[in-house]
Amino acid sequence: MSQVKSLKDLKRSDLFQQKGYIAEEWVDAVSGKTFDVFDPATLDKIATIPEMGREDTGKAIKEAHTAFQSYKKTTARQRARWLRKWSDLCLEHSDDLALILCLENGKTLTEAKGEVTYAASFLEWFAGEAERIHGEVVPTANLNQRILTFKQPLGVAACLAPWNFPIAMITRKVGAALAAGCTTVWKPAGETPLSCLAQAVLAKEAGFPKGAINVITTLKSVDEVGKALCESKLVRKLSFTGSTRVGQLLAAQCSNSLKKLSLELGGNSPFIVFDDAKIETAVEAAILAKFRNSGQTCVTANRILVQKGIHDKFLEALTEKIKTLKVGPGTQEGVFVGPLTHERAVEKAMNHINDAKKYGGQVVLGGSPYEGAGKGYFLQPTVISGMSKEAITTREETFAPVVALYKFDTEEEAIETANDCDVGLGSFIITESTPRMWRVAEALEVGMVGVNLGLLSACESPFGGVKMSGYGREGGRQGIEEYLTIKSMLINVAN
Ligand code: SIN
């Protein structure tokens, strides 16, 4: 059996940082307070990190603002070169980055490597976009005037990354911000600060100037830090990925400074399997959409809606496949389902399972915490089907490896059920019919639709939602626009 990996296996130990980062200095919190980071697979302490607060945040903002005065004058070509270098460094050190990510988040090493590649892709993508920030010449009604527009960076951008994709979400935000000419203050999630800190090491090495990158770490003082970022008039942009509840709070706190916001919030993705689907395609897509990061993605297949003609065959094939998925620490070879990241996650999933049972749900597989992999936050991969729409699984993200299956009759019913919720982030359609693909994709109230696949992630594709899933787009051609403002210039050309 191969050796289980640990921090001792890092090739570059300097990527493992346990301090905040302000203006090229690795710093403690002004208060001297700290918090601990744990491996969710073993519950072992892996790091002690500064518990920063309002004062530290104020310093980081000030440094970012000072740096902005010169950074905004750098050429797009130069910024693109720094981003490309950073992307290359990520790939060069992907084993180390993946190990750090795996240990603090719990995802498997294979998935963590995938996330590093995904993270690097945003840097490369936005390196290209930096040089495509174009203005326009606008046709005028007045013969004596010419009008043109050009785009400029907004200023300091606060980038708040979640714990489920700590490396890729920081580059998706920061890559766009730095490409646009903004300077940045990063706030990683308290559960997973180490991946972001490692990224700061590489970004510095790539050549970004002093103050362009600052990292504030916090677990318990997150409200205080969030408020400081929201209320500061020097911060002109805030980008957040996380829950709808926190997104609403941040939007309210940003209202006084009227800063530009992007909010990528909770989802409740329908995964719709039609009678005409290929079973193998449906199962493969469902495994990816449901079990990536142990079900902890904003676009996870939360409600699997299956048409009645294919329902039983699909349920059987999916269950058989899930039985083969190995559960265990992400550092162990062959593991497909790692632990959940958060200490309350298993309890939440169990509440959802027990609630579904009350509403007629049959547990087809799993249904309990997993005891066979040590002390961590493990749950048995679970399949539950047949509950009525009143069950919590219909309305709330379970964020765990729990497959919740519902039967439907007609296409209209599937669309109505899929849209019957407050949020609208991702969705999946499995069908062999092209006309149906169009009809359903157009009718779904979501920001993203996957067809015959289980992954919505690509740096070229705009990522974001509608309704209570927030607003703004990350990645794609649109991602950089979130960090830019348009200036129009009207010129008198009369003699
Ligand atoms: C998320 O879960 O918030 C992001 C997932 C992705 O980008 O694929």
Image: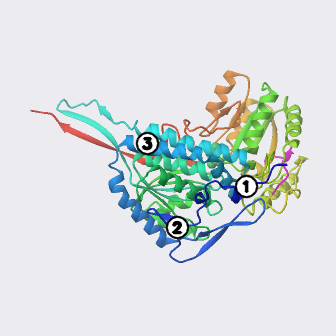
Picture coordinates of residue 97 (x, y %)?
63, 51
> CA separation, marks 2 and 1?
26 Å
Task: Please give the residue where the numbered disc 3 appears in the rendered image.
Answer: 81
User: Can residue 382 be found in the magenta stretch?
Assistant: yes
485 vs 145: above or below: below
Q: Is mark 1 on a helix, strand or loop?
A: loop
| N-terminal-most mark, 3 or 1 | 3
What residue sits 52% from the left and 49% below the top? Answer: 173
> CA separation, marks 3 and 2?
32 Å
Q: Which amino acid does label 3 sit on?
A: Arg
Judge by depth and name the residue closer to the eye, 408 or 128: 128
| N-terminal-most mark, 2 or 1 | 1
> CA separation, marks 3 and 1?
33 Å
Picture coordinates of residue 78 (x, y %)?
38, 43
Q: Which amino acid does label 1 sit on?
A: Gly
Q: Do the residues labelled 2 and 1 touch (CB within 8 Å)?
A: no
Q: Nearer the viewer, mark 3 or mark 1?
A: 3
Q: Is mark 3 on a helix, strand or loop?
A: helix
User: Can residue 30 be found in the magenta stretch?
Assistant: no
Q: Which picture quadrant has residue 143?
A: top left
Q: Which picture quadrant has residue 40?
A: bottom right
Looking at this view, name the residue that lies furthest to the bottom.
Answer: 31
Q: Which of marks 2 and 1 is in front?
A: 1
What residue sits 61% from the left and 31% below the top? Answer: 442
Mark 2, Cα crowd under 10 Å, few <14 / some 14-19 / many 20+, is many
Q: Which mark is residue 106?
A: 1
Q: Nearer the viewer, mark 3 or mark 2?
A: 3
Q: Is mark 1 within 8 Å of ligand 1?
A: no
Judge by depth and name the residue closer to the eye, 373 or 273: 373
Q: How many marks?
A: 3
Range shown magenta: 378-389
Looking at this view, name the residue that lies furthest to the front.
Answer: 11
